[in-house]
Image (cartoon, grey):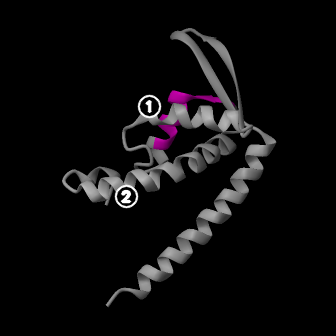
Amino acid sequence: MGAGDDIGDPQLRKFQKELSAGTVALVLLAVLAASGEPMYGYQIAKTLERSGDGVLAGKQSALYPVLRNLQAAGLLDSFVEPSDAGPPRRYYRITAQGRTALRDWAAAWRATRDSVDSVLEGSRE
C-alpha cells in the first residue's frame, strides 16, 4: 500500500500526515549522509521519490521548511551557488552534529518500529 492509497479516508490521511512529520527529518539526514556531497532541494526530493516510496507523497514543498529547521538546529549547513539552469541553488550538507542525530534518531526509529510491529503482530487473530 503506497502513500497515495488514502484518498477517501480522512483519518488515514491525518495519521499519515502525523507519521510523516516525524520521519521526513530522519530520511533527509539519511539521504544527505549517504550522498557524501552537498545536494540541493530538488535533488533531495528526486532521491526520495526514487528510494523513499512515498515519504514526501508528492509534497516537495514540505521538504524546504524541514531543511531550514534542520539547518537552524545545526544538523545541516548550506551554501548558495549560481546555477546554469536558472536561479541560484541552495546546497545542503550534513554536519557532524547531524550525523550524531542521524545515528540516534535511526536507533529510536528502529526501536519504535520493532515495538509497534511486535504489538501489531500480537494483535492478529
Q: Residues within 10 Å of mark 2 (few under 14, many from 20)?
A: few
Q: Which residue is mark 1?
A: 61
Q: Is residue 91 left or right of residue 97?
A: left
Residue at image coords 69%, 44%: 33
Residue furthest to the bottom in view is 125
How would you classify the magenta stretch by its main secondary structure? Answer: helix
Q: Earlier in the sequence, mark 1 or mark 2?
A: 2
Q: Position of residue 124 (x, y in %)?
A: 35, 86
| Residue tagged 2 | 15
Q: In the rendered structure, find residue 74 and report the number of the disc placed on it.
A: none
Q: Quadrant of the C terminus?
A: bottom left
47 shown above or below 1: above
**Amino acid on which disc 1 is placed:** Ser
**Residue 76 location, x and y as percent?**
70, 36
Q: Is residue 102 left or right of residue 120?
A: right
Q: Is residue 68 magenta?
A: no
> Element at badge 2?
helix
Q: Residue at x 49, y 43 (%)?
A: 48
Please tell me whether residue 44 belongs to the stretch shown in magenta: yes
How far apart are the two marked residues, 1 and 2, measured between alpha carbons? 19 Å
Where are the magenta residues, as a range? 38-48
Classed neighbour count for the residue bearing mark 1: other residues with Cα under 10 Å, few (<14), some (14–19), many (≥20):
few
Of discs 1 and 2, which sits in the foreground?
A: 2
Give the image location of residue 67, x and y in percent: 59, 34
Residue in the picture at 25% in, 54% down: 10
